Image: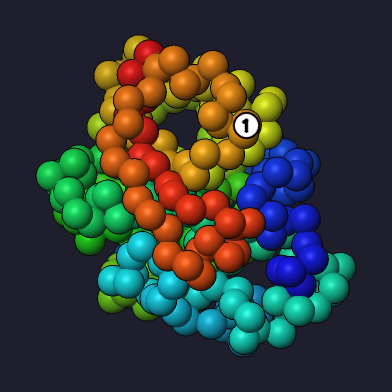
Amino acid sequence: MALSLGWKAPRSRCGLLLQAVRNTGLLLFPCGQCPWRGAASFLDPEKKAFLEENTEVTSSGSLTPEIQLRLLTPRCKFWWERADLWPHSDPYWAIYWPGGQALSRYLLDNPDVVRGKSVLDLGSGCGATAIAAKMSGASRILANDIDPIAGMAITLNCELNQLNPLPILIQNILNLEQDKWDLIVLGDMFYDANLADSLHQWLKNCFWTYGTRILIGDPGRPQFSGHSIQHHLHEVVEYSLPEPTRQENNGLTTSTVWDFQP
């Protein structure tokens, strides 16, 4: 499936995140309201079994071998199946995208960036960057994605890494009243011009209203490198991508963490 699917390309298609933007949502694990030991009860048993059967636990081929994740790999059935046989929304969460890899690596290597701070992981996907923030000592974390299946995958990935399940917001957060965060991280989200414009304005508002630090991970996609946000970015670190990640992302070779300072 991944070899022929539009969703598997580096987020150049409108696909899930534009077509499925929702005005209503679901907070799966609200902060302070869901004891971790009971979090498994929030997972639909059939969908949980489906994810466990059709993903592979892996920590290889990425910038963060410390983090185990359930992903679609060539050893999974749906890597090769026709796209229409996948029974849920396009599984963007099942790929560990290079921008997220760079952000996660940076937080693991620089725990002072998040230690004791509140962190919003916007477009969390598999949850790797939120997990890296937790491993590095963040005091409050919210993982946000619009796909409920991503929320389930994030919870399973927390369990894989011996972490209590993180709070997860399943909603288009750009439509909500902005909250105060010490740090917002987002990776691989600048893949569509309209979404990029909306993100740019929303992030500027967060910075101007609350003084939030904003870190963006991206491997240099045209929609990002050609966007006006470039005038407000400062390069933090660039990573060389492992060969498996290069092969999965049409030969992209590096991924960079940027500090957004409008």
Percent position of residue 96, x then y = 50, 61
Q: Which picture quadrant has residue 225?
A: top right
Q: Percent from the top left, x then y, of residue 74?
A: 63, 80
Q: Nearer the viewer, residue 133 or 215?
A: 215
Q: Residue at x 42, y 58 (%)?
A: 241
Mark 1 — residue? 223
Task: Reply above or below: 210 against 73.
Answer: above
Disc 1 element: helix
Looking at the rendered structure, the kind of residue marked 1 is: Gln
Residue drawn at (38%, 54%) of the image: 240
**Could you tell me if residue 151 is visible in this image?**
no
Give residue 5's quadrant in the image: bottom right
Residue drawn 75% across and 41% down? 14
Mark 1 neighbour class, 10 Å CA radius: few under 14, some 14 to 19, many 20 or more: some
Q: Quadrant of the N terminus?
A: bottom right
- Give the image location of residue 117, x and y in percent: 20, 40
- Pinpoint residue 210: horizontal percent, then vertical percent: 30, 19
Type of colouring: rainbow
Left or right position of 228 against 83: left
